[in-house]
Image (cartoon, helix red, strand yellow):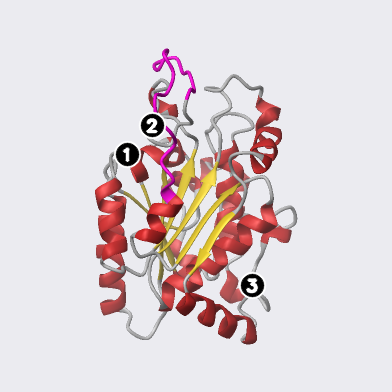
Amino acid sequence: MSYDIYKINPEFRDIMPQEIIDLEEKATWSSFREKPRGIKEISETKELLEEHSLCAGCPEAMALRYVLASLPTPEETVIVNSTGCTSLMFPHIALHTVHSLFGNQNAVASGIKRVLEWRFPDRQKDVVVLAGDGATVDIGLDYTLQSFFRQEKLTTICFDNEVYANTGGQESGMTAKGQVFKMAPTGKKFEKVPMWELAKTSGCHYSVNITASAPKAVAKVVREAILIAREIGPTFINIYTPCILEIGLNANDGLGEMKEQDKERFQLYKYVSPEAEAYLAQCKEKGLL
């Protein structure tokens, strides 16, 4: 796979904006560069994500850009996503993506990973699951945990906006206790599910809880998680990406909200298993980190 994985249909090429054509011709695939692309290059190079249809100032859009900029080899990566706000962005990505049914993304990803290992035994193929808290922790929790139990070599990234944002504002298991939404008027009755701890208990070799307020920090954990998943086993990242509409903030308030929560509910949680720690040390020696 190379640049050919993203091609505009010739019949539509004459009506495509130049930005989309540039995405096909100038996307920064890592294997065509002297050094891997990184978070610092977002403002200088053509992104794998050209545009999106999410709300202005949405932290999920920020987080997705950071994730895409941090993929070790994007041209050899398949992202599996689920129904939710994030699914509105995937048609704009110059990358292999698979849209699963709501909640079964880890089951779909497991099958894709196994087939890729069989079909391309001599090439490293990364499979990354990217879904919201509803798909990961509520409706899809069984599929998520079973992939951890089976030690599937996947990286699961949860965009945790603490609400069912695209269906009107219902609470999820990840909603903070006491939070009031339009369709949860009496407030959440129980504590937020600590999915990062559940991931550790369920067999993940790397589990992180973080916000999208610091691009370099997000980039670091994404690269580490994917590299560990290649060789050791399942990894999990929970990224707080608040729905600014549902919590009543303005479009430019998302970053401030995440920074505030860095100090309160989202102080960095990071677990690395002994096997993963040893492997990361090898990766550093090889210059992969």
Q: Is residue 17 visible?
A: no
Q: Position of residue 46 (x, y in %)?
A: 65, 56
The segment highlighted magenta reads 178-195
Q: Secondary structure at mark 1?
A: helix
Instruction: In this rendered view, identify the residue nearer to me: 182 or 195.
Output: 195
Image quarter for residue 33? Answer: bottom right
Instruction: Report the Cα–Cα distance between label 2 and label 1.
Output: 7 Å
> Does the CB distance between marks 3 and 1 fall below 8 Å?
no
The residue at the point 58 percent across, 62 percent down is: 221
- Marks 2 and 3: which is nearer the front? 2
- Residue furthest front as drawn: 190
Give the class, few, some or many, for how many residues have Cα within 10 Å of label 1's Cα (few <14, many ≥20).
Answer: some
Tell me the residue that label 1 is attached to: 138
- In the displayed structure, does residue 206 sit left or right of residue 249? left
> Does the CB distance between marks 2 and 1 fall below 8 Å?
yes
Instruction: Report the Cα–Cα distance between label 3 and label 1.
Output: 36 Å
Circle nearer the N terminus (2, 1): 1
Tell me the residue that label 3 is attached to: 36
Q: Is residue 141 visible?
A: yes
Quarter in which the N terminus is drawn: bottom left
Quarter in which the C terminus is drawn: bottom right
Instruction: In this rendered view, identify the residue nearer to me: 227 or 73.
Output: 227
Tell me the residue that label 2 is attached to: 172
The residue at the point 40 percent across, 26 percent down is: 171
Q: Position of residue 32 (x, y in %)?
A: 60, 75
